[in-house]
Image (spheres, rainbow, N blue to C red):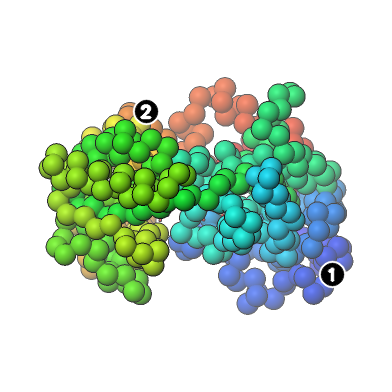
Amino acid sequence: MDISGPKPELLDRFAAIVGENHVLRDPEDLAPHLVEGRGLYHGVSPMLLKPGSTEEVSAILKLASETGTPIVPQTGNTGMVGGQTPRAGGSDLIVSLERMNRIREVDPVANVLVADGGAILADVQKAAEAAGRLFPLSLGSEGSCRIGGNLSTNAGGTAVLAYGNTRQLCLGLEVVLPTGEIWDGLRRLKKDNTGYDLRDLFIGAEGTLGIITGAVLKLFPQPVGHQVAMAGVNSPDDALRLFERASNLCGTALTGFELMPRIGVEFTVRHMEGVRDPLSGPHPWYTLIDISTSDSPETAERMIQALLEQGFEAGLVQDAVIASSVAQQNALWHMRESMSDAQKPEGGSIKHDVSVPVSKIPAFMTEADKAVLEAVPGARICAFGHLGDGNIHYNISQPVGADKAGFLARWREVNAIVHPIVLAAGGSISAEHGIGQLKRDELAAIRSPIEMDLMRRIKKAFDPAGIMNPEKVVSLP
Ligand code: FAD
Ligand code: 2HG
Ligand code: ZN
């Protein structure tokens, strides 16, 4: 493969497929697509193509396979592991589905919504709501991430506890294979045991097996009752015990249970517009509890009150607030969802998107804190996340006054401290963000040879020319 990049004549052939109006070639126009939100990866690409149809995606991939041109799919560019960023060699073309953003169909009786791969998540949520239904996938990035990206990363988010992650929310897919062939798997069946589940291979593949151009998504009834509370607690252990009570009391009505440290709350209050300290005094930790009920609003109200009462009585909850309006509910969630962005003005953040069995969260945090602070004195540990899913964003903000680049240069070293603790607890080094470029080599190091071999064989079977998002997730020898 020519790493100096495709020749101008070849670029023109790609451009002709979508029309010159739907191509970016100017370095200034391309620039935002060559970096990701963390600024960790800076790619190089001569061209971004915006196909307007599945057939155009097919023609692009056919030409790419014939000419050995690497292709990087990109939808919202909110991914956190560099999967959507082209490599530095200048050979990769970016395919963006931003024009393929239609909601194709909503069927509230069958409880399905069919969307283009480039449909923005917030638009899918709105279309479901307009039909009196709920599409429960919810992420801080929902205003810009797109369904193709959500499926390709198998995104998690804040409602996994009740509804599962994106994989559980998808019934069928339409995918363009690296060869240009189109697989129409837009099925709407809950029960379908007809051979290997191809859909599940594409979900979470991070664009390495094909481009997802359409999806059948599951809808749910809208909740009748909804309550959101924020409770100040003394420790992750108390948060865990409160979670246990919440699960017992609410069952499937418990839709979210998030954990935040005081330092994260301070970051959001300091840097995010309109965020106020949620309780009258500071607390070492905060839990955000979300309850949705299907029978009556009163049930949700009773549940949240009973839970907080139990929490106070057991000495688990130190102070709490129940949102008294939808605006207040949104404000509490906004604080939690902006925690990732609020870390940015504080300098470098070395991140760990990890999961452990939920009961092991406190022990994991104690051990990791000790080891990290020994290695990086003054490190500001801002560990927050989806406690109910056992998924903690064990993020470490640089010590005050430290050099950002110098701190970030220790990324791998700090990962090498935290990840073994996660693995010893039976956990995962990527709970919801994926592998991309960031964790590719680490994946190969921790998974068994047979597992890696199977992944490589799948990659080769789907992408014999090796053009689909090469060197992401798995590298081929
Ligand atoms: P992109 O970033 O464009 O791409 C992501 C990956 O998917 C890349 O490997 C890309 O090549 C591939 N890809 C994209 N589109 C396609 C396609 N159509 N076909 C095949 N492959 C494709 N993630 C969570 O899981 N949970 C969270 O709670 C969460 N919160 C976030 C909050 C913020 C503020 C931000 C910035 C990010 C958050 N994320 C979260 C990460 C990110 O939003 C998700 O990974 C999201 O699913 C990515 O979607 P995207 O459209 O931006 O994809
Ligand atoms: C969240 O849950 C996201 O807010 C982002 O997954 C986490 O910045 C992060 O590490
Ligand atoms: Zn998250």
Kindly report the distance in space between the C-alpha atoms of the residues bearing marks 2 and 1: 50 Å
Q: Amino acid at mark 1?
A: Gly
Q: Nearer the viewer, residue 250 or 302?
A: 302
Residue shown at the point (17%, 54%) measured from the top left: 319
Q: Which mark is residue 253?
A: none
Callout 1: SS: loop
Question: Is residue 314 shown left or right of residue 446?
Answer: left
Residue shown at the point (57%, 22%) measured from the top left: 450
Q: Is residue 460 above or below residue 225?
A: above
Q: Which residue is mark 2?
A: 426
Q: Rate crowding at label 1 as few (under 14), some (14 to 19) or many (20 or more) other CA atoms within 10 Å.
A: some
Question: Is residue 318 shown left or right of residue 91?
Answer: left
Disc with the residue nearer the chain's start (2 vs 1): 1
Q: Which mark is residue 19?
A: 1
Q: Position of residue 281 (x, y in %)?
A: 14, 62
Q: Nearer the viewer, residue 424 or 408?
A: 424
Q: Position of residue 5 (x, y in %)?
A: 73, 60
Q: Amino acid at mark 2?
A: Gly
